Amino acid sequence: MNERNGSLRATALSRSYAGVRALDGIDLTVHRHEVVGLIGPNGAGKSTFVNLVTGFDRPTAGSVLLDDVDITTWPAHRRVRAGLARTFQHGHTFGALSVQENVEVAALGVGASARTARQRGTELLELVGIAAQARRDAASLSHGDERLLGVARALATSPTFVFLDEPAAGLNEEEIGGFAAAIRLVRDERSAGVVLIDHNVALVLGVCDRIHVLDQGQTLAEGTPDEIRAHPAVAEAYLGVLDVTGIGVS
Amino acid sequence: MSAPETTALVGRRPARLVLGRHLVPLAGPVALTIVVGVASSAFSDSVQLQLHTALVTTAMVVGLSVFSGNSGIVSFGHVSFVGVGAFAAGIMSMPAQQKATVFPELFGFIRDNDLGNVASLALGALVGGIFALVVGTALVRLSGLGAGIATFAVLGITRNVLRNWSGVGPGAKAIPSIPQTTGLTQATVALLVCIGVAYAYQASRWGRRLRASREDPAAARGSGIGVYKERLIAFALSGAVAGFAGAVYVHLLGSVSVDQVYLELTFLTLAMLVVGGIDSLWGAVVGGLFVSLLNSLLFEGEKGLSVVGIDVTLPASSSNIAIAVVMMIVILVRPRGITGGRELRLRALRRPRRAEG
Amino acid sequence: MKYVQYLIDAIALGSLYALVALGIGLVFGVMRIVNLAHGELLMAGGYTLYETNGWPAVLRVLTALAVVIAVALLMERLALRPLRRASPTTTLVMTFAVSFLLRSIAQKRWSAQGKTMNLFTDLNQAFTIGELRIKYLTIAAVVVGGVLLGAVTLFLDRTDLGLQMRATASDERIAQALGVRANHVVVGAFVIAGVLATAALVLFAPQRPVVTPDFGLQIAILALVGVVVGGMDKPSSATLGGFFIGFANSMLFSLLPKGQRVFLDSALYGLVIVVLLVRPSGLFQRETVTSRL
């Protein structure tokens, strides 16, 4: 795996829909070997941000740089091949393909050989903990497993940066512990930069190195989990309503 | 099946399993083709001709399914590629000295040359493939209704040009004197070749990527799959297979005119694909042969048929009506076709696995 | 003066295609179905006119109207209503099958040989204004076309059913959640499409007096080209597209030299593909916001 210190940088990223500013001048840099949390209330612009950076939507202003190369106008699949993977909030599995094939096809998508694809499939299903379902049709998975499959599929493209869009929704507490461990493994052993979006604040505070808080399309705060926890505006806008006691997930 | 066993299977994948994975889905279509081919020799000349037509038409359906089956996009325009393949092979198989007198307006290199049987088949595939590649660059950007209408438009353009451009073809007339080399052997081998190509594509990385995009285009892009490019590869390949089938077809007919490769053939091949099941190669082959068989039975029935001692005579030209009705019933009752859209599998019987875990 | 003559002929043909296109557009609006069998409504009416030859003209037109509406409703009830939840592609294939079925039945019943409809042939006579030669049919086409288009517009604007149709066309699910009965709306759309198809048929009959199994297909395909070019989503843009395509077809036919005229079809089909690629929602319609992920 490539060990150089890469970065993914969004500068002044903005998106308007019919005059409404969904995202307004966001600056965010992610390095390899780190997990960055992206949190904020519903409608804050988190998914818009992911779509813009991964090429599923075009910004009205601003740019996206991968290792200092401007990729703002690249189509999504080209970004994936350059090392930028994502999961989806709403399923988006290849329903009629088996779980194993779902992962294999993502490896094939970035040019892996059929054999490598098979190995990667087996390995990654183990990693996210759904190896037992390998031969089922993806359409038959539970919502929680569907999201885990999404994570395995994103990792099958050997990303240097990966965006996980609410991957833990539908998991129970025990499963969340295992999932947090898997995220750290992706950071430490695959040297990837991870952007984690999730409503489970405990998971985000527990696993992230840095956290970026969005509110109404703008940056509300950024910093380490401790700084975020202590940040008055964040507590008011977001954390205050939640139970933050279960932080020690690790 | 317990979890450790599953992982062991996908992990090492013993040779037996790889064989089973590829042999069974391929064996079904191949066996069916050979059975129909061999069986045809037991019948009268007219029935033989119908069975050979069935094999060749099924080859066209296989060509159509290379694109539609893997991409999930229905094309109304594939008979265009059958048509250009048929016309290319036909006009180049007509003896040169005849062409000079019958079609003097042809371009020189078309008028003054002719080709042997195999070379003309290769030409059909080449012309069909190139034509599909050219129109495909635009069409692969569309899906759903847009793709349906645009492919229909391609069919209209192809017919309009073939019918009126006397530099490349016979115009409104038919191409005569094409050697009738397509008999039992050529029809059977041609269908087998098409099935082989279609299966090889389907099992390849390109085929697998395209099928993933059929399931979910957004997720496919998110997996690094360039959907348009994958569609274009399939479109060009399916055009080549269709063009090849068209070339084989003219060598069965002996002559061809524009109206033989237009709406009626479009309807027939589409009906075959829909009736068999659009999602799989097995569906294309079963549908092609099944509808052909139905067609032949009705045709014989119109002449008067003796069924278990009772003489039945169907009213004339009812076969198109019957096929249309069968197609509509299949769409309503079994929308994934009589094969259910799956490849043939031995373990089909123990497939429902979602109850466990 | 020659060009004014061309212009008048083009407007007349444009009006006829606008009627057919509005029928296709209305059905698409409320059902999201491109009905490839729309032309067979004209064909059915055409054979009805042939079979009723010798009856009083008004009675013949009313009989044709009844037959066309009956065929339209049968089509909707038997083939399309069960597919309400199917994909657009499935329904497109279904309407193709319906079209083929109806043409096969016609071929079997009346053969591929044309049959003469023999209706209002007097309308082919013309009067002259200076150098201009104007057929009574041209006047009829423009008047009937205009009146019917106006009537449908009033219907959509002013009646309860029209309002429900527009609501369904704009968002079917919301409309149904608000209590719009989908079947009423759809049946309404097919009845109106039938009326418009019959009107177009009656106006086509004097100038194209021979009905064949492909009679309707040829008209409907060109109208469909217009609908796609104009924009399928709104009845008004579909109608405008239909008028445009009939107008352009007539104009180009008059202007092009004979050698190029034969490729006119190719040019129109090519136009459809270009519009689908460059402006999928049509020329006469504002671009809608693309769907978000």
Image (cartoon, coloured by chain):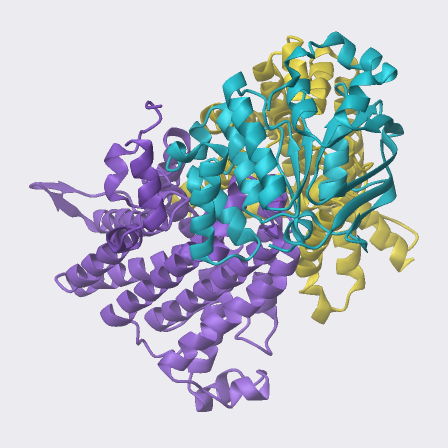
Chain colours: A cyan, B purple, C yellow
Left or right, A221 with respect to B112, comes to right
Figure check: B87 above or below A146: below
Q: Position of residue C17 (x, y in %)?
A: 71, 41
The image quadrant where one finds the N terminus of chain B is top left
Residue closest to the far left: B309
Q: Is residue C238 visible?
A: no
Q: Is residue B46 visible?
A: yes
Residue drawn 19% across the image and 65% down it? B45
Residue drawn 47% across the image and 69% down it? B85
Figure check: B292 above or below A46: below
Q: Nearer the viewer, residue A70 or B261?
A: A70
Residue drawn 35% across the image and 26% down it? B354
Quadrant of the rendered image containing residue A196: top right
Residue drawn 66% across the image and 48% down it? A160
Q: Position of residue C16 (x, y in %)?
A: 72, 40
Figure check: C127 above or below C267: above
Quadrant of the rendered image containing residue C15: top right
Left or right, A84 with respect to C103, comes to right
Q: Position of residue B321 (x, y in %)?
A: 37, 41
Left or right, B41 with respect to A246, comes to left
Left or right, A41 with respect to A178, comes to right
Figure check: B314 above or below C83: below
Q: Nearer the viewer, residue A200 or C58?
A: A200
Q: Nearer the viewer, residue C202 or B71?
A: B71
Q: Position of residue B144 (x, y in %)?
A: 59, 41
The image quadrant where one finds the C terminus of chain B is top left
Number of numbered tags placed on the structure image: 0
Q: Nearer the viewer, residue C273 or A103?
A: A103
